[in-house]
Image (cartoon, rainbow, N blue to C red):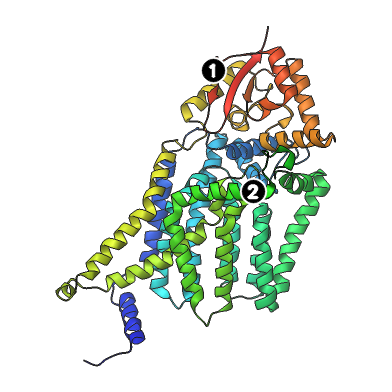
């Protein structure tokens, strides 16, 4: 038997894996379709009215209020750029036109968005695979593997159930990356610029990635720099200027309020600085992410090392390396007040794609083994068992979390108790009445919150900052308006978050003086304590 160089043997083995199998070229797409259908079936089967997360309820409430004529940023404090709210306004309008419950219009959109991201993972993986000379059917199966992994990553699974801004942001962001690592031309550069602008207009966490893409084009692809930057600046700048001119409060909401969400030194525990606070949060939330997705993250980092180890690389490999690394470092955003481990959903597609590169290539080697080789060595059997254990370590914690999410264990409040609160609102108030409540309950009951005080965390933070600086602004004005309404007993029902709104002295005193509790004990949700009040006398 002639002896072949090791590289030639590997190339022939890889060719055999792609040509000897009678798979149709449509089979990977068929499997991808089944993954998406399975995901959708599981999600739809568990749709309910439970309280998923504060942000979900807040964004749906704001979107509903926009359909009633409220002006974004001017009338309602909103922490995000307009894209998420424009889409929400459209969804709320659709619900009104077809006369169905708006909650399920939002849920349907969230489902379709995550399904689209599963497909984008598939396409982007194929693009990345071609950078390391993996093409055709093999690249398609790498894409299917990435789609499967992404569908099972628990943080994104949970976060995408609600109407959050990050799922829409990452669809735009990763779509731009697909174009940037494809065969570039002026049209794709313009398209990538528009998509990046839309990502930044959905959530400002996309801004650093926009700067990364700009730097890459300026250094490596200069002929496409101007088309990309021109489209990016035209869309982002045009919308920003228009929003500021129309509302007079856009930059205040989207920039200043976000900067103001970092804790001030005066409000930190004694001995703690902003730096130690940020590091503590990154370590704390990062540990939670590693518990759920540590196996996939380790594989992704290993794949990134292997991807960048080659001496000769395409410039697009450089973009993928820095892009994926920075996306996985999205966990540092938890240093901002009110941001938790969910922010890592921005990096999950990168984790899925890179982990798939390791799993798929390893499985390709295992498939080349024949049972007849056991006569010479049984070590391949040990490899198969090790591979199976790797899958268990990688997926078991996440699947457990997903199961708990489907059982509403990671919800802010389960469906049964949520419905009790909503029924109480409808019983105690009329459609035109104003209430003081976390926004999700107000959205389900279709009741306006007094002063549109829905962004509880930022309103509270703003109030304390203005008090500390002795510079009255919108925060103090909102509290004064609510206090007057409480003193006049105009608010027919109060569902008070004791750890946020309930700590504001003026509101607390007005409730104690003019209202009586309906419950005898606090209602404890996943992260809050609630008390329910009605006017006394």
Nearer-the-camera pick, 104 or 428: 428
Q: Is residue 261 visible?
A: yes
Q: Quadrant of residue 137 in the image?
A: bottom left
**Which residue is rendered at x = 45% and y = 78% of the image?**
133
Position of residue 295 in the picture relative to residue 74 (left or right): left
Nearer-the-camera pick, 325 or 247: 325
Nearer-the-camera pick, 305 or 57: 305
Residue at the outermost top position: 537
Residue 231: percent from left, percent from top: 72, 65
Residue 454: percent from left, percent from top: 67, 33
**Which residue is rendered at x = 77% and y = 58% of the image?**
237
| Residue matched to label 2 | 276
Residue 190: percent from left, percent from top: 67, 68
Position of residue 412 in the picture relative to residue 537 (left or right): left
Q: Which element type, helix, strand or loop, lies under badge 2?
A: helix
How packed mark 1 is, by other alpha carbons closer than 10 Å (few <14, some 14-19, many 20 or more), is: few
How packed mark 2 is, by other alpha carbons closer than 10 Å (few <14, some 14-19, many 20 or more), is: few
Q: Which element type, helix, strand or loop, lies under badge 1?
A: loop
Residue at the outermost bottom position: 2
Residue at the outermost front position: 271
| Residue matched to label 1 | 521
Considering only order in the chain, which callout, 1 or 2, is on the residue closer to the N terminus?
Answer: 2
Do the numbered discs 2 and 1 sit on residues whose CB atoms are within 8 Å?
no
Q: Quadrant of residue 32 in the image?
A: bottom left
Nearer-the-camera pick, 406 or 67: 406
- Give the Cα distance between marks 2 and 1: 36 Å
**Which residue is rendered at x = 45% and y = 35% of the image?**
408
Quadrant location, the C terminus? top right
Residue 198: percent from left, percent from top: 66, 57
Quadrant location, the N terminus? bottom left
């Amino acid at each position: 038997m002639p002896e072949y160089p090791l590289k030639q043997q590997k190339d022939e083995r890889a060719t055999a894996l792609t040509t000897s199998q009678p798979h149709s070229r449509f089979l990977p797409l068929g499997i991808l379709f089944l993954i998406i259908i399975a995901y959708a079936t599981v999600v739809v089967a568990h749709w309910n009215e439970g309280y998923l997360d504060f942000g979900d309820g807040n964004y749906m409430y704001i979107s509903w209020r926009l359909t009633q004529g409220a002006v974004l940023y001017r009338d309602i404090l909103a922490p995000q750029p307009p894209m998420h709210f424009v889409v929400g306004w459209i969804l709320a309008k659709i619900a009104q036109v077809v006369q169905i419950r708006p909650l399920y219009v939002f849920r349907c959109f969230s489902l379709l968005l995550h399904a689209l991201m599963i497909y984008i993972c598939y396409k982007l993986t194929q693009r990345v695979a071609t950078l390391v000379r993996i093409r055709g059917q093999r690249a398609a199966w790498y894409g299917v593997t990435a789609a499967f992994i992404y569908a099972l990553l628990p943080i994104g699974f949970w976060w995408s159930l609600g109407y959050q801004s990050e799922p829409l942001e990452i669809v735009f962001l990763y779509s731009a990356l697909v174009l940037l690592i494809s065969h570039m031309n002026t049209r794709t550069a313009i398209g990538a610029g528009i998509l990046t602008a839309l990502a930044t207009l959905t959530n400002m966490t996309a801004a650093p990635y926009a700067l990364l893409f700009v730097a890459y084009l300026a250094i490596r692809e200069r002929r496409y720099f101007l088309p990309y930057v021109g489209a990016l600046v035209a869309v982002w700048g045009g919308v920003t200027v228009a929003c500021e001119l129309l509302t007079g409060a856009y930059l205040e909401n989207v920039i200043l309020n976000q900067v103001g969400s970092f804790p001030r030194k005066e409000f930190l525990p004694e001995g703690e600085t902003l730096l130690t606070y940020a590091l503590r949060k990154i370590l704390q939330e990062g540990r939670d992410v590693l518990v759920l997705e540590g196996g996939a993250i380790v594989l992704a980092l290993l794949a990134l090392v292997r991807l960048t180890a080659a001496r000769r690389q395409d410039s697009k490999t450089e973009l993928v390396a820095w892009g994926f690394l920075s996306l996985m470092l999205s966990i540092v955003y938890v240093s901002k007040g009110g941001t938790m481990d969910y922010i890592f959903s921005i990096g999950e597609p990168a984790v899925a794609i890179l982990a798939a590169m390791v799993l798929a290539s390893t499985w390709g080697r295992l498939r080349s083994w024949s049972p007849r080789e056991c006569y010479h060595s049984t070590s391949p059997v040990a490899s198969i068992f090790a591979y199976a254990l790797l899958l268990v370590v990688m997926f078991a914690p996440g699947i457990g979390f997903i199961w708990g999410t489907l059982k509403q264990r990671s919800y802010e409040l389960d469906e049964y108790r949520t419905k009790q609160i909503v029924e109480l609102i409808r019983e105690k108030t009329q459609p035109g009445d104003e209430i003081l409540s976390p926004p999700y309950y107000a959205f389900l009951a279709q009741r306006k919150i007094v002063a549109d005080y829905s962004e509880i965390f930022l309103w509270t933070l703003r109030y304390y900052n203005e008090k500390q600086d002795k510079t009255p602004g919108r925060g103090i004005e909102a509290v004064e308006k609510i206090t007057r309404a409480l003193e006049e007993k105009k608010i027919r029902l109060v569902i008070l978050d004791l750890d946020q709104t309930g700590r504001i002295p003026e509101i607390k005193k007005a409730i104690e003086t003019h209202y009586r509790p309906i419950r005898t004990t606090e209602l404890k949700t996943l992260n809050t304590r609630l008390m329910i009040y009605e006017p006394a006398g």
